[in-house]
Amino acid sequence: MRLLFIKMIVLFMLILTACSHSSNEVIVYCTVDQVFSEPILRDFEKETGIKVKAVYDTEETKSTGVMNRLIAEKDNPQCDVFWSGDPVRNSVLQTNGITDSYQSEQTNLIAEYFKEKDNNWTGFSARARVLIYNKNLIATDSLPQSVFDFTDPAYKGEFAIANPLFGTTTFHIAALFVNLGDEKAKQWMNDLKANGVVIAASNGDVKKRVMNGELAFGLTDTDDAFEAQKESDAVDFVFLDQQGSDIGTLIMPNALSLIKGCPNTENGKKLMNYLLSKETETKLAKSCAQMPLIKGTELPDNVPSLDNIKSMNIDYDKTSAKLRDIQPWLKQWAEQ
């Protein structure tokens, strides 16, 4: 009798959970800056009549906050679509059995390199890692040409990176570990520390410190760099590691995943179809200088084409695994 009572309670809770979601809504967890992503989601609402409920990451826990929430909700999914600022988080979720395969009509417009082979994630609109610098503090011909130049004593204490436990900095460091091997990557990180690297709270904090003249330069993303240029004539940026045998700069596409067992599957697919379009890529290019992945997308004059940037070779699955592996070491490094 007691067992039957427990089963009835569980059934009631499942029904209650199912009924708590409207049939005319879609729930998206998003790591992309709200100032850029929210207008696009509102446009989707206006065009489809489907209500969007969005959960955004904070700047300080960028990319990890909602990812960890999705992992915690695995057995009772509350989200339909995960919109990430890079594919590594989607790959982590795929490894945990949280993503579902979905091939949008637009998927074929995206190069194979920027999508998962079984359609657990699909990329669109990309950013790149760049060096942002203050022209009043350092001359263009004195700038580092590579991330590996940051260990030069001439730059001691004059530069910053964001906390490597969060956001695109984590992705960047993990990619370097995969490309260099653990020993060389750890040595480079330790050499950064010895050369007085400033660990900022976020990419936005790196931007702010360089704009304010607190530091000569730092690593950030193209969207932050373009925003800084709008706010200050003293700021400019360059792509690093662009010469012959250089490693290239990290290119980071947005990535979309449908969540397995999500409450609003069909609306989730409609949102993904909407985001994987030339129209969305044009909006992101204009609002935050993101570089389109779909050929023929309208590109503002101030946004570079990916065709003109030497990119780092990335294995997303290996980088995702490495990101998880090095977290304890990075935490120790950041707190020393």
Image (tube, rainbow, N blue to C red):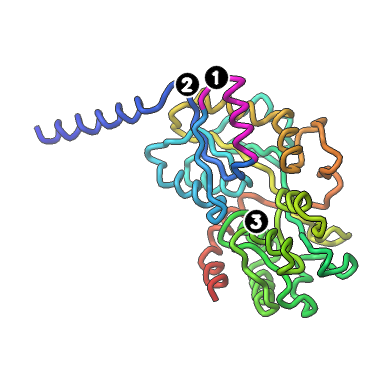
Residue drawn at point x = 74 percent, y = 37 percent: 111
Quadrant that contains the C terminus: bottom right
Report x, y in % for residue 181. 67, 66
Report x, y in % for residue 307. 85, 44
Q: Which residue is mark 3?
A: 204
Q: Earlier in the sequence, mark 1 or mark 2?
A: 2
Quadrant that contains the N terminus: top left
Answer left or right for 12 relative to 276. left
Q: Earlier in the sequence, mark 3 or mark 2?
A: 2
* Label 1 to label 3: alpha-carbon separation: 34 Å
Q: Which residue is mark 2?
A: 24
What's the residue type where badge 3 is placed? Gly
**Where 165 falls versus 116 (above or below)?**
below
Mark 1 near mark 2, Cβ–Cβ under 8 Å? Answer: yes
Crowding near the residue tagged with mark 3, few <14, some 14–19, many ≥20 C-alpha atoms within 10 Å: some
| Quarter of the figure with residue 205 | bottom right
User: For the residue labelled by badge 3, is the local secondary structure a helix, a strand or a loop?
Assistant: helix
Q: Is residue 281 visible?
A: yes
Q: Which residues are magenta?
A: 36-51
Nearest the viewer among 122 and 42 is 42
* Label 3 to label 2: alpha-carbon separation: 35 Å
Residue drawn at point x = 75 percent, y = 66 percent: 217
Hey, which residue is sitting farthest right in the picture?
141
Between marks 3 and 2 in the image, the one whose residue lies nearer the viewer? 3
Q: Which residue is mark 1?
A: 49
Answer left or right for 220 relative to 63. right
Between marks 1 and 2 in the image, the one whose residue lies nearer the viewer? 1
Q: Is residue 313 visible?
A: no
Judge whether residue 115 is colored magenta.
Answer: no
What's the residue type where badge 2 is placed? Asn
